[in-house]
Amino acid sequence: MTARVEQAVAILRAVAGRTDPTSPLPLAAISASVGAGLSTASRVCAGLVESGMLERGEAYGTFATGPRALALSGSAAAALGPTVHFELHRLAQETAETVILSAAEGTGARIIASVGSGWTLHVPAAVGDVVTDARRAVIRALAGDAAEAAMVESQAGRAVEIAVPLTSPDGRRLLSLAIALPVYRAVRARPRIRRLLADARRAFERALAEGHRGPVVPPPLDRSTITTSVRTEEAALRLVEHLAVAPGSATAAAAAVGLRPDRARRLVDALVRSRLLARDAETDALHVDPAIHAWHRAAFLPSLARRGSARAMATAERVGACVFVTTLAGMRSFTVVEHIEPMGEGLLMAPWLGRPHPLVGSDGGPTLAMDFDAAQLAHLFPRRHGASEYDQFVRRVQRVRADGTLTMRSVDEFGITSISAPVRDAAGLVAAAACIVGATEDVSMRLPELQEAARTLAARLSEDLGATYAASSGSVDAVDAASIPPSR
């Protein structure tokens, strides 16, 4: 029975572990990738579709990642998510180079998060991609010996990679953090990159230690909650989903999801063999493989491309205004979806699709930055802007956190006002801003209607990304201002 669990995990990884997990994969390709017969692969895929881990593609016999798998990925990534969000953007801001976070997968490394370089000539790194070149630092940092514990450097062609391992309190090398850059810039940048990576390593390992638990004492077993009717694959998935948010023992997880302890232990053994779970060497607590953090992040842009355009068009036509969906690209706002409506007789908004804009002054800029705390905002705020611009930006972040939407007049052009609302991903972080933009006189007269339209659009896009709540809401937590650090 546990062999079915291992087959299901292998097939789920084959479909979800790609740079575009939402792209339908033919059954023949799935079967070949896991070494299973077509009939076996078909049966397992059907079970995963029934559970919500996969969904059927439009073409017959094709399968894509389902909403439940994206939610699992987000749940597993949530605890470390704020650290990943800030540290990767901090490193990218400080170096202007590509920043890569990877987890071991097989003999290679899966890229689970990245922030791209601001340079024209740069090293690419796609979330969900697997690095297989054993010479590269991202792999060596994960598998290195004690001599390579502090810092690893590699050069492949004209790309240099400098990486550090990120270890758990029990000594396991969970992740590698790297900065990649062309060899031409490496000579001057190397000392600074090494110092920045060492600082980031300490921040990551503090976050990993906070999630490290001592020996877990399971609650008394309530046999009235035990169910025997759940099929094997579903029982295993429930265990993994619980452990994604509450790492602990197999017995504790069994009690939480209503399984017999002996059955849960057999399922956990199968999940450990398939490497979806790992045991903490000190506490025996079970943790979900961090390689699956890539699933929801890799699905982000494809999901917006597939469903976002239609949602933006419907909203724009309903309210008679322009709609843009923007995301962070480094510390710039980047438009990934747009629908442009006339801005009154004789006027038209210029397209922004595929174009970056400085975060300060962009329609959804403060909304995109609302997950950063005061000290982080002060550190990331572009130095070319002064204290008054920083204070205004912080006030806008405070407003969107308190109200759930942000209304602001364009700082670049008269007559334009925008309303933005946060779009959250499966890990609960702000992944994008849904922006409604119109003529100031029109927006002013219809403000409550347009604010609600922005909230609704953001909620629908959040659901597409695997978020588990319906709408944006205000927060009682405010972001206090902090002094901008001196110029670097």
Image (cartoon, rainbow, N blue to C red):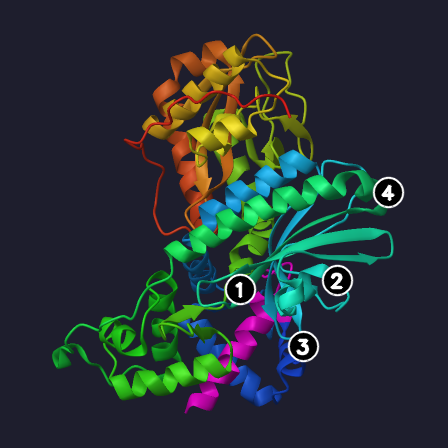
Sequence-wise first label, 2 or 3: 3
Residue under label 1, please give it. Answer: 174
Residue 13 is inside the magenta segment:
yes
Give, as a single range, the part of the protein colored magenta. Answer: 1-25
Residue under label 4, please give it. Answer: 184
Question: Alpha-carbon neighbours of circle 3 within 10 Å: few (<14), some, or many (≥20)?
Answer: some
Sequence-wise first label, 4 or 1: 1
Sequence-wise first label, 3 or 1: 3
In what element is the residue under mark 1? Answer: strand
The Cα–Cα distance between marks 3 and 1, rounded to whole angstroms, is 29 Å
Please state which of residues 383 and 469 is positioned toward the viewer in this rendering: 383
Residue under label 3, please give it. Answer: 29
In what element is the residue under mark 3? Answer: helix
C-beta proximity under 8 Å, tags 3 and 4: no
Task: Look at label 1 and name its amino acid.
Answer: Leu
Please say if 122 is above or below 488: below
Question: Alpha-carbon neighbours of circle 2 within 10 Å: few (<14), some, or many (≥20)?
Answer: many
Question: Alpha-carbon neighbours of circle 4 within 10 Å: few (<14), some, or many (≥20)?
Answer: few
Task: Look at label 2 and name its amino acid.
Answer: Arg
The Cα–Cα distance between marks 3 and 4, rounded to whole angstroms, is 40 Å
Q: Is residue 458 visible?
A: yes
- Which mark, residue 136? 2
Question: Alpha-carbon neighbours of circle 1 within 10 Å: few (<14), some, or many (≥20)?
Answer: some
Name the residue at 64% across, 11% down.
346
